Amino acid sequence: MSRRSAAVPTDGPPPPRQPDHRARLADLAVDWYARNARDLPWRKPDTTAWGVLVSEVMLQQTPVARVTPVWLEWLARWPTPAHLAAEASGEAIRAWGRLGYPRRALRLHACAVAVGERHDGEIPDDLDALLALPGVGAYTARAVAAFAFRQRHPVVDTNVRRLVARAAGGLADAGPATTAADLAATEALLPADPATAAVASAAFMELGAVRCVARTPLCEQCPLTAVCAWRRARDAGVAAPPGGPSRKPQRYAGTDRQVRGLLLAVARGTEVPVPRAALDAVWADGVQRDRALASLLDDGLLVEPAEGFYALP
DNA sequence: TATGCGTGGGG
DNA sequence: TCCCCAAGCAT
């Protein structure tokens, strides 16, 4: 109570946070990124907006190492949305390979078609137009606007949410996703200049992916350590441990998800419609198999061109 | 807002 | 071996 004086710069932990402090976060991240960014193919300067969009969709829930070869094949085969839109959607599913969540391939094809219909074949640079495209949500739309068009938008994925919660919020982990608050908290960290802000967004993502990781953060190798609120809180003894965020168990073995994957793999591996018997062979439980097949047909990932025969659309 | 949706690599 | 994931989206 008596220590209210704002006069003397005492020792002890620095004051909470100041706009200047937040600006430092972006500066440090940008500087680090310039020297440490991974050399990923979709980051090359000549990558088109279409290439950026494809990479973002593929990277939704799929690791970089598995995306890279498939992205290269896709862009070589379908260098523009028009090239993909001219194909049957089943070709997108086939070329998706085993990246997982094949509905993304279907949506990417639908996206290519929509871009042809609405935007004369060019990926739009307007955020709302991007958000309206199939398979493009809050994250992907801003990622494309920032990385392909150098616009100033908060690009918030799970890694950025965690990094911002820690470095700016002083918390061990991000809470449940609350889009509006997440966007605001991240936006507050962005430099004013759009192109620099875009680099800062890439830098935040990269740091979240390779330094400020969930379980075992590598603070000693993180360029933000000196200004990280979470780090400061821990040094002051008022920290929470890296308490692992609680994911849902969601076992995979034996789930409909696995059965769908097995059934779709059969169709993906052949050019001609397969008889029901070929599907029966990959999963014993007929009830679950039928349910999975019905859901694949319902999703449009499979079609039934003739009674009892199934194929990619 | 909670849930369903694939897959293969690493601890 | 088994568990935990890894740059979300749509409903």
Image (spheres, coloured by chain):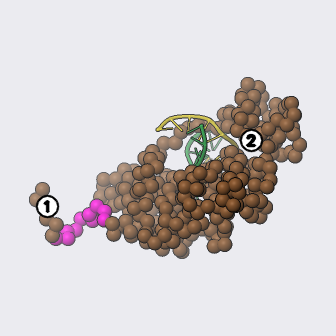
Chain colours: A brown, B yellow, C green
Name the side, left or right, on which A128 lies relative to A39: left
The residue to which callout 2 is attached is A301
Judging depth in this view, the residue of C11 and A211 nearest the camera is: C11
Is residue A241 shown in magenta? Answer: no
Given the image, what chain letter belongs to the residue carrying mark 1?
A: A
Is residue A9 shown in magenta? Answer: yes
Question: At label 2, which amino acid type do we have?
Answer: Leu
Where the C terminus of chain A falls, by quadrant?
A: top right
Q: Specify start and end residues of the magenta stretch as a single range.
A: A8-18
Q: Eyeballing the image, is A45 above or below A86?
A: below
Give me the residue at 48% from left, 74% from top: A31
Judging depth in this view, the residue of A25 and A230 nearest the camera is: A25
The residue to which callout 1 is attached is A3
Give me the residue at 83% from left, 46% from top: A269
| Discs 2/1, front | 2
Where the N terminus of chain A falls, by quadrant?
A: bottom left
Which residue in the rendered view is the most extreme toward the left?
A2
